[in-house]
Amino acid sequence: MIQAFHRDEAFLTDVARKPSSSDELKVWWVGQSGFLLRTGGSFLLLDPYLSDSLTKKYARTDKPHVRMTERVIAPERLRGIDVITSSHNHTDHLDAETLCPIIKANPRVSLVIPEANREFVAERLGVSPSWPIGLDDNIRKDVAGWQITGVASAHNEIAKDVSGHCHYLGYYVQRGPWAVYHSGDTLVYEGLAGKLRQLGRTDVAFLPINGNRPERGVAGNMDGADAATLAHAIDAGVVIPHHFEMFEFNTADSREQFIPECERLKQPYRLLRAGESFVVPCAD
């Protein structure tokens, strides 16, 4: 099993370390598509998966979810979280065994979801349907000081409910001088780069690299070359890959496509190990 860079007490110590400035943006990869962000004294947790629920669910099936990387932290130990996001209803992005302990430990936390998923989210998490904050494509809301705009994702299609709300979203997030894009799960589709450029500068793009292989029996994502190309197209300050090194059947090697294409395009990138932090450089 791949060892986490930091886990348990070491991870919490790093999270608690005082920032060098009040507007520093620090990010931690917590595995799969999950990232913890801190700036302006506030914490945002993007799409966390911090359990073994899928490994247990698919044990002794034809689609075993064998974990590759150690868990970074037990979810109930995460305190001081202001906002959590879920980009869609797949369990590695909406996990009751992760989210319920975090919500209990952070009673004032806000949960941002696609509006189309409100009833599903309420049932899975056992919360009031009115509590989550719903977003849709190109809808922006201020949530605990974080300005969050929904961006349609194609996983594999741009799926919508009967009211036209998207089931799969990415989030373009702004706070203070910073702007980041977390894709959720998505393929690159026509108009995505233009939509992101219209929203503004992207200091960090968090993009999946596990690819689109129907034989896996799960919905696909962009691969490493796609992620590098999209980051370059939106002039991202840095691209950080996700959705790999969690499950043996659905992963990628960043050295095969992602790194070579970033280097060919001269696109800045950063590879993180689970539990590792990164202080985002200030824009020129």
Image: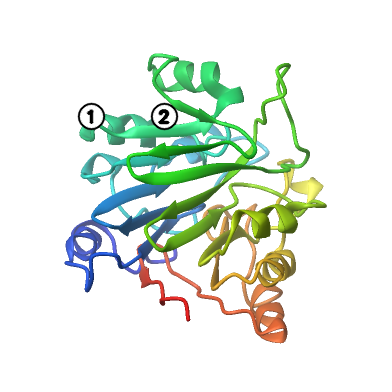
Q: Is 85 on the left or on the right of 188, as rendered? A: left
* Relative height, residue 90 to residue 170 (above, below): above
Residue 75 in the image: x percent, y percent? 30, 42
Q: Is residue 49 visible?
A: no
Residue occupying the point 54% across, 43% down:
149
Secondary structure found at label 2: helix
Residue 134 in the image: x percent, y percent? 51, 27
Mark 1, other Cα within 10 Å: few <14 / some 14–19 / many ≥20: few
User: In which quarter of the view is residue 60 placed?
Assistant: top right
Quadrant occupied by the N terminus: bottom left
Residue 159 in the image: x percent, y percent? 74, 31
Mark 2, other Cα within 10 Å: few <14 / some 14–19 / many ≥20: some
The residue identified by callout 2 is: 96
Residue occupying the point 24% across, 60% down:
15
Residue 19 in the image: x percent, y percent? 22, 68
Residues at discs 2 and 1 in contact (Cβ within 8 Å): no
First along the sequence among labels 2 and 1: 2
Numbered circle sitting on residue 76 = none
Q: Is 208 on the left or on the right of 143, as rendered? A: right
Residue occupying the point 36% across, 53% down:
71
Q: Nearer the viewer, residue 84 or 73?
A: 84
Q: Nearer the viewer, residue 183 or 49?
A: 183
Count the numbered circles shown: 2
* Relative height, residue 227 to residue 128 (above, below): below
Q: Is residue 181 visible?
A: yes
Q: Amino acid at mark 2?
A: Ala
User: In which quarter of the view is residue 144 placed?
Assistant: top left
Residue occupying the point 52% across, 41% down:
92
Q: Nearer the viewer, residue 256 or 46?
A: 46
The residue identified by callout 1 is: 107
User: In which quarter of the view is residue 145 placed?
Assistant: top left
